[in-house]
Image (tube, rainbow, N blue to C red):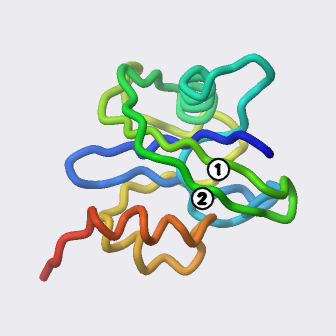
Amino acid sequence: MAQVVAAIIEREGRYLLGLRAAHKKSAPECWDLIGGHLEPGETPLEALSREVMEELGVAPTGATPAGQIEFTDAHDGSSILHLYRVEAWEGGEPTIANDEHTALTWFRPEQIQVLPNLALAEYRMLFADRARPGP
């Protein structure tokens, strides 16, 4: 079973998602949390730090475990996604640092709820408890 990590990056009630590039084998052109696969010998927290640095050019200064999601995709088969909440980082504003994503956007939870092209349907439930009724 593949082991994957993802950062739930929050700032001022908004969450950062990346639009996966069209060339990606898994979930192309879908909005996704920042993260990726564990490399051999890596812990989930080490993989999270590496992935966030590779994809955004910033280093998380603290990450809190936020649960797991089991899922299946056509490319990797069965996987476990280790989620970490990230509220602080070093290195400035997160920006696209490689070819994984074509856009980065800060979304309110209720906006995530209605995105038609989420990488995992489970993200809707993940952000459901964070959504607040709005005008």
User: In the rendered structure, which amino acid carries the disc numbered 2?
Assistant: Leu
Q: Residue 43: x percent and y percent?
A: 63, 22
In the image shown, does 75 or 105 lie closer to the viewer? 75
Q: Earlier in the sequence, mark 1 or mark 2?
A: 2
User: In the rendered structure, which amino acid carries the disc numbered 1?
Assistant: His
Q: Do the CB atoms of the residues marked 1 and 2 lie less than 8 Å apart?
A: yes
In the structure shown, which secondary structural element does the residue marked by tag 1 occupy? strand
Q: Work out whether 19 lies above or below 122.
A: above
- At horizontal 55% and vertical 80% (from top left) the residue drawn is 116
Count of numbered labels shown in the rendering: 2
Q: Residue 102: x percent and y percent?
A: 63, 53
Marking on residue 19: 2
Specify the quadrant of the image occupied by residue 2.
top right
The local crowd at label 1, few if under 14, some if 14 to 19, many if 20 or more residues have their Cα within 10 Å, is many
- At horizontal 46% and vertical 46% (from top left) the residue drawn is 67
Q: Work out whether 94 lies above or below 69.
A: above
- At horizontal 38% and vertical 40% (from top left) the residue drawn is 85
Reading the image, the residue beneath label 1 is 101
Q: Work out whether 100 lies above or below 102.
A: above
The C terminus, quarter of image: bottom left
The N terminus, quarter of image: top right
Specify the quadrant of the image occupied by residue 19.
bottom right
In the structure shown, which secondary structural element does the residue marked by tag 2 occupy? strand
Distance in Å between CA atoms under marks 1 and 2: 5 Å
In the image shown, does 59 or 80 lie closer to the viewer? 80
